[in-house]
Image (tube, helix red, strand yellow):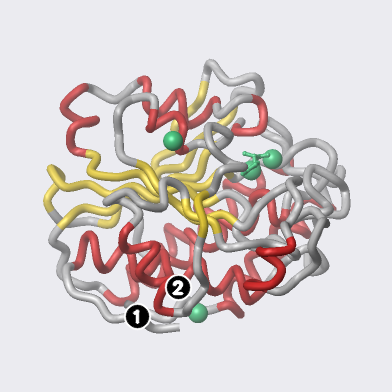
Amino acid sequence: PPDISLTNMQAHLQSLQDTATSNGGNRRAGSAGYTASTTYVENKLKAAGYTVTRQRCTTCTYPSDNLIADYPGGDAAKTYMFGAHLDSVSAGPGINDNGSGSVALLENALALAAAKPTMDGHVRFAWWTDEEQGLNGSKYYVNQLTSTQKSQLKAYYNFDMIASKNGGYFINHVTSAAAAPMKAYWDSLNLQPEENTEGAGRSDDYSFEQAGIATSGYAMGASARKTSAQASKWGGTANAAYDSCYHSACDSYPSNINTTGLDRSADGIAYTIWKQAVGTSTPTN
Ligand code: PHE
Ligand code: CA
Ligand code: ZN
Ligand code: ZN
Ligand code: ZN
């Protein structure tokens, strides 16, 4: 798998920060800052050769678009989806929550298009709207799938807050078959990942889980506090929040991004894409 570029992800985060700054300080679903964020991601994908589908979420609290991009090729009966919400809360620019997941996915989509591997399975990327109002963009997407389309989804991987400054290494459904490649990559870095208990039922993977689709993903934590055992194994500050700027104006770039964590997640996503849909893989970082 390719080594996903931290430098490129940082440039995307700076653009999302600029987008919030020039649009009232946030990228909330339905706002000008959100629309500009979708245009930014869409244009980068188009320049790499992707066809991008805008799906209007009409049932959302703030009607606005999900972005869907399929990498051409591979067996549609073995489809793997990778998603992140692109909207922020109105309190701030939403850089860790969830510029982090959004740019890790974007850079993975661009790296896949550049590598042009022969595909075994099929890969689809999604950027969700209106997550902050109740997982509404992803719910809308899942609800419009036919039962055949649902059965073709072998796994959905979610990325929400993957660069928390005082974060930990959390995996959704860590012992599941779907999580195995995500865990294998972090195990190769000796990160000793734990179950994402804080995030259970709280992000877009839950929309898929409720439809019976296997789900996993990475997270580094939100407002819950790091335990002393976790600080011992991962470093950071015990008894402090994983992200002290959660849903606040200070969730901004560059101050609220853990670059080491972001790069470890992004490289693990590439490892998982290759493992699940390309076929053979060895860890890189
Ligand atoms: N889904 C939450 C949000 O976007 C983030 C979160 C993730 C909270 C994981 C807790 C655990 O605000
Ligand atoms: Ca990297
Ligand atoms: Zn949030
Ligand atoms: Zn979030
Ligand atoms: Zn679950």
Question: Camera-side residue: 83 or 239?
Answer: 239
Which residue is under mark 1?
283
Give the residue drawn at x 18%, y 38%.
Answer: 152
Nearer to us: label 2 or label 1: 1
| Disc 2 within 8 angstroms of ligand 2 (CB) | yes
Name which residue type carries label 1.
Pro
Q: How far apart are marks 2 and 1 (CA)?
A: 8 Å
Mark 1 secondary-structure assignment: loop
Across and down, in percent, residue 80 comes to 28, 49
Q: In this view, does 62 lie above or below 83?
A: above
Which residue is under mark 2?
267
Is 252 placed left or right of 79 in the picture?
right
Is 206 placed left or right of 148 in the picture?
right
Quarter of the rendering containing residue 250: bottom right
Mark 2 secondary-structure assignment: helix
Q: In this view, does 281 lie above or below 220?
A: below
In terms of image quarters, where does ligand 3 lie?
top right
Give the residue drawn at x 13%, y 61%.
Answer: 120
Across and down, in percent, residue 191 comes to 52, 73
Q: Residue furthest front?
A: 229
Name which residue type carries label 2.
Asp
Give the residue drawn at x 58%, y 41%.
Answer: 199
Count residues near mark 1 (Cα–Cα under 10 Å), then give few for <14, some for 14-19, many for 20+: some
Marks 2/1 in contact by CB < 8 Å: the verdict is no
Closer to the chain start, of discs 2 and 1, is: 2
Quadrant for the C terminus, please. Answer: bottom left
Q: Can residue 51 be seen in this view?
A: no
Quarter of the rendering containing residue 256: bottom right
Across and down, in percent, residue 71 comes to 28, 56
Q: Can residue 65 be seen in this view?
A: yes
